Image (cartoon, rainbow, N blue to C red):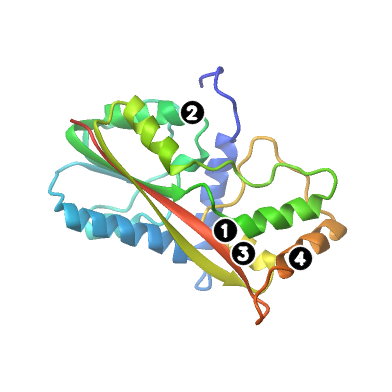
């Protein structure tokens, strides 16, 4: 671990979140739509690029669809970006829903660059800046005069492009596209996030909300509902396409 890097996220909590979400995905009613949106986009990009490499590393909850499309075995556990990536070099690395909870993102991108063979392709998708504005509002209202850190800091697309250049990628495309979903109550949104390994993994874990805090969160979320009583939440998906020359 690089002790000079602020420890915003907990690696232990990140791995625990993945295991819990993996178990939750076994339920037929589990939310999958965000995972499916990311995976479908990656599969489309691979088809458009006509990727024909030999070695591939695929990681992240929901990436099973990417592996199946490429005729590869199911992906393993989440990548550990604090160390060099084993098994390299790869012609392709796919990462879904991982890079937004890495403490040392510049270092992680350097590890990914080193793990690619010359001409190798990196495809990564995650939630970026602009995501979850309604949930953020509800959590601020829940905490009242003493707000706690409950929502992750988010990566902007322009910043991601600059970090890719710094890591050594000579060609990169950073796309952003929004996905929206509507919820009758804020706790249904939170359940969907947990199903899809998008819950909090902040190192400084906030105290659980008490009854009054939960009521304030519910009211704040309901206050911005549409006429039918459902609130529209925004998810800004960032997808990175980058090559190693």
- SS of the residue at dot 1? helix
Label pair 4/2, CB-CB below 8 angstroms: no
Residue picked out by circle 4: 218
Quarter the C terminus occupies: top left
Residue 127 in the image: state x and y as whole percent: 48, 50
Residue picked out by circle 1: 193
Label pair 3/1, CB-CB below 8 angstroms: yes
- SS of the residue at dot 2? loop
Q: Which residue is at 68% across, 65% downward?
A: 186
Q: Is residue 2 above or below residue 21?
A: above
* Mark 2 Cα shell of 10 Å, populated few (<14), some (14-19), many (≥20): some
* Mark 4 Cα shell of 10 Å, populated few (<14), some (14-19), many (≥20): many
Residue picked out by circle 3: 189
Q: Which residue is at 55% across, 35% downward?
A: 11
Instruction: Name the mark on residue 104.
Output: 2
Query: Residue lying farthest top?
Result: 4
Residue 216 in the image: state x and y as whole percent: 81, 61
Q: Can residue 174 be seen in the rendering of this structure?
A: yes
Label 2, label 1: how many angstroms apart (C-alpha)?
Answer: 23 Å
Label 3, label 1: how many angstroms apart (C-alpha)?
Answer: 6 Å
- SS of the residue at dot 4? helix
Label 3, label 2: how many angstroms apart (C-alpha)?
Answer: 28 Å
Badge 2 or badge 1: first in the primary sequence: 2
Q: Which residue is at 53% across, 68% downward?
A: 181
Badge 3 or badge 2: first in the primary sequence: 2
The reply, left or right, for residue 38 in relation to residue 131 is: left
Residue 44 in the image: state x and y as whole percent: 25, 60
- SS of the residue at dot 3? helix
Label 4, label 1: how many angstroms apart (C-alpha)?
Answer: 16 Å
Badge 3 or badge 4: first in the primary sequence: 3
């Amino acid at each position: 671990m690089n002790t000079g890097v602020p420890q915003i996220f907990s690696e232990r909590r990140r791995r625990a979140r993945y295991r819990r979400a993996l178990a939750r995905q076994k339920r037929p009613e589990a939310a999958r739509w965000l995972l499916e949106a990311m995976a479908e986009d990656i599969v489309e990009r691979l088809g458009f690029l006509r990727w024909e490499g030999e070695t591939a590393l695929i990681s992240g909850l929901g990436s099973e669809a990417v592996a199946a499309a490429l005729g590869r075995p199911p992906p393993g556990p989440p990548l550990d970006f604090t160390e060099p990536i084993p098994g390299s070099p790869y012609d392709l690395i796919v990462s879904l829903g991982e890079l937004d909870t890495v403490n040392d993102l510049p270092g992680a991108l350097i590890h990914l660059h080193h793990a690619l063979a010359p001409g190798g392709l990196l495809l990564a998708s995650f939630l970026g800046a602009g995501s979850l504005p309604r949930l953020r509002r509800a959590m601020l209202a829940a905490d009242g005069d003493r707000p706690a850190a409950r929502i992750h800091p988010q990566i902007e697309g322009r910043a991601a492009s600059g970090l890719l250049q710094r890591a050594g990628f000579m060609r990169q495309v950073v796309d952003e596209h929004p996905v929206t979903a509507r919820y009758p109550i804020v706790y249904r949104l939170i359940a969907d996030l947990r199903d899809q390994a998008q819950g909090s993994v902040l190192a400084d874990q906030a105290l659980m909300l008490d009854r009054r805090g939960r009521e304030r969160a519910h009211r704040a979320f309901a206050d911005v509902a549409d006429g039918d009583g459902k609130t529209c939440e925004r998810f800004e998906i960032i997808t990175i396409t980058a090559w190693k020359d």
